[in-house]
Image (cartoon, grey):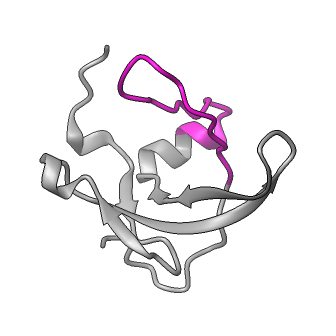
Amino acid sequence: MANVPEAILMIVGVVEGATRIIGKSQGYIGLPLRDELVDCTVNGERTPAMVSAWFPMPDELARLNASAPVHLRILGEAHPPVAVEVGEVPADSDPTP
């Protein structure tokens, strides 16, 4: 696994409507989540889901605009179902929790 300096990682934001923060007690910085229910074609209606918000750094935005891919890193050996999407433009320009 690549060792990525924290200084170049996306900033964890507070997702609108956050319902809890996970990971802080495990030594991570804490990840604000919004719990919601979605209609899933595989798992059915009202499938529990969690949404988090991430804000790219200026150099990451430049790479994304140059067609660089988005990488999703999952810790562990089992890959859960995930989705990656772009959220709404934040009204507040400060993405820090």
Q: Nearer the viewer, residue 75 or 9?
A: 75
Residue 58: where, in percent of width, then height?
44, 52
Q: Magenta segment, principal secondary structure?
A: loop
Q: Quadrant of residue 1?
A: top left
Q: How many marks?
A: 0
Residue depicted at x 25% and y 58%: 30
Residue 70 included in the magenta stretch of the image: yes
Residue depicted at x 30% and y 17%: 2
Q: Nearer the viewer, residue 8 or 62?
A: 8
Image vertical order of residue 43 relative to residue 11, above or below: above
Residue furthest right in the image: 41
Image vertical order of residue 24 relative to residue 65, above or below: below
Residue depicted at x 52% and y 81%: 17
**Magenta residues, as a range?**
63-85
- Quadrant showing the C terminus: bottom left
Residue 47: where, in percent of width, then height?
70, 55
Residue 76 included in the magenta stretch of the image: yes
Residue depicted at x 62% and y 39%: 82
Q: Nearer the viewer, residue 65 or 35?
A: 35
Judge from the rendering whether residue 11 lies leftward or rightward of residue 74; answer left or right. left
Residue 88: where, in percent of width, then height?
66, 71
Residue 54: where, in percent of width, then height?
46, 56
Judge from the rendering whether residue 43 lies leftward or rightward of residue 14; answer left or right. right
